[in-house]
Structure formats: C-alpha cells, structure tokens
Image (cartoon, rainbow, N blue to C red):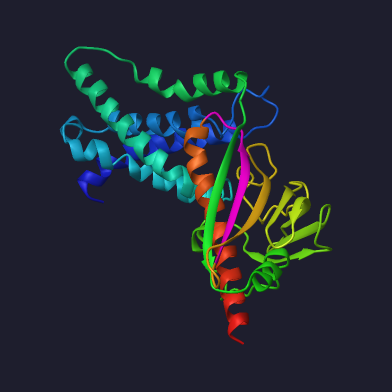
Amino acid sequence: MSPILKKLLPAMLIPLVFALFVRLLFGIDGLWGLFGVMTIGFLFFMPFAMGALLIYFSSIEMVKKNWYCILIPWIPVFLFLAITLLFSIEGLACWLMALPLFMLAASLGGIIGARTKINRENGKTLHISLIVLLPLILSPLEQQLAQIPGRYKAYTSIDIHASKEQIWSHVTRVSEISAEQDKGWPTRTLGFPRPIKAELNYEGLGGYRKAIFDKGLVFDETVIDYDHERKMTFTIRANPFDIPSAAMDEHVVIGGDYFDVLNGTYELQQLDNDTYRLHLYSHFKLTTSFNFYASWWAGLIMKDIQNNILQIIKTRAEHEGQI
C-alpha cells in the first residue's frame, strides 16, 4: 500500500462510518419522529459533515491544496452510495436525485473542514464536533415544523398530423406499449415503472380509466370533466399499499408521504386542417422541507412520462392516418 493511501484510508473511514451510523439512526422507526431521511438535515448537512470530517483528519499538507478539499470528499460519498445500494438501504432513484446535493455539500464541508484544521494549527479552535452534530440537531427541528404541501404543474404538448378522431381514440384508450416503443429513458434510468396501457370503460363524465405500468403498478383514474374530442380531465389515485415494494423507492412512491399525483388533463387544439396540438398537463403534490429542490426532479419525471405518452399517441395516430 502506498504511503499516500495509508494516510488517506483512516480519513476516508471516519466520514464513511459516520454516514452509515446516521443513516441507520435516521431509518429507525419509533424514535418519536425525531429523525428523517427526507430532511435538509440528512440530505445536506450529513454529507457536509462527511466532507468536513475527511479533510479535518487529513494531513495538513494535503489540506492546503484546494482541489483536495473540494474533490476528495466525494470519495466517501460514492462509497456510502455503493454500500446503501448493495444492501438495499436506499434505491437508485433516490440516490440519483440526491447525489448532486451530496457532492455539493461534501465539497462545502471539505472547505470548512480545511479552514477548521488550518485555524487549529494556528492556535485557533473550532470544534469539529459542532459540525458533526448539525444533522442530528437540525433534523429533529425540521420534523417538528409543519411541512406545507406544495402543488405543482407539469405541462407538455405535441403537434400531430392526423384527424381528431384518430388522435382522440388513442388519448382515451392506449393499447399495449412495447418496450421498443417506450422512449422514456430518464424515468427508466431512475428505475420508475414503464407504461403498459390505459383502459377506459366509457367516454364521458364519471368514466373509469385504469393506467397500467409494469412491476405491478396501477393508477385508478376517474373522469371529472369530458368534452368529446376536445378535453378530458381525470383524477389520479395510487394506493401506496398496493404498490409492490420492488416497483418504486419508498421515498418517491406515488401516493406516499412525500409525492402524489393529483390529476391529469388532455386538451386537443386544432392548428390547421391537417394538424392538431395535443396538450397534456398534470398537477402533483410534494410534502417535504426542500420542495425547492424536489420540485425540479418531480417536474422532470412527470414531463418525461407525459412526453413519452404523447410521442406514442402521435406515432400511432399518424401511422393510422397513412393507412
């Protein structure tokens, strides 16, 4: 083992063990609701403390190098990621969404850790324990504060060269979608179930629509506004207790504690004799203390799902018009 690695290994292990301890602690049910993974205390200040710890326990020669303080804290973050995925402590979707925040926080923690160590060398004191305690102090405070649900809208549209009859028939009922037709690569990368088909018992107010995804995921939809070949609005209900545990990560499960889709609307607008614009928008709800960050990811996911469906409708309607 190289001398550099020998010096680096203890500094790596300390923040890694700390992160695993905090994750296990925050995952324990029954601690009076003091800790939660879906908090800024965990998602930002835990990796912040990881970066500070690593740099603080590094050699003073390395600490004085800016690149070291900014980039090296990412290593225990990636090791933490690998361990939690390996033992199914966290899901891939959660990690892909949290990783940019973890990397930023770890680098900032590294910078503060370097300043703390340099100050100590100069006779000034700032106890690293204060930084380490931040996630343990802030998460309970967040849990006691009322989390105000935020309501958001995801809007998408597509232009289709087909008759309104052909388009609308594919809007109300979507026949089975093969894996080759599914182009929603961002949601597939995040591990979300892919759409299979949508069934509607009748076209009109009060109609029951069932959207079926793979991995056993089903959404129950009720039509609450219907204007034939013009507009259809439906509520969306997902019972999280009916969703298989393998289908979605518990922290992003639709209908769960943090994320829920409320409704969806199709609107068909005529542009000219041969072209229609199909609008699709949905409203979803987030209940976290960091909606400012989570809403960007949720919007990205919803728009990818909607664009995927719209593209399938366009391809099928235009192909039907050419026959």
Read off the magenta span.
Answer: 276-289
Percent coordinates x, y for residue 145 in the rendering: 60, 19
Instruction: Compare residues 253 and 21 and report the one nearer the observer.
Output: 253
Left or right of 41, for residue 48:
left
Is 109 placed above or below 200 here? above
Q: Can you tell which quarter of the image residue 112 is in? A: top left
Is 44 placed above or below 204 here? above
The residue at the point 58 percent across, 56 percent down is: 279
Is 155 placed above or below 108 here? below
Q: Main secondary structure of the magenta part?
A: strand
Q: Can you tell which quarter of the image residue 211 is in? A: bottom right
The residue at the point 53 percent across, 55 percent down is: 156
Instruction: Compare residues 191 and 310 and report the one nearer the observer.
Output: 310
Percent coordinates x, y for residue 73 in the rendering: 32, 39
Q: Can you tell which quarter of the image residue 217 is in? A: bottom right
Percent coordinates x, y for residue 309 in the rendering: 60, 64
**Is residue 244 one of those drawn in magenta?**
no
Is 234 placed above or below 213 here? above
Instruction: Compare residues 168 and 242 and report the one nearer the observer.
Output: 168
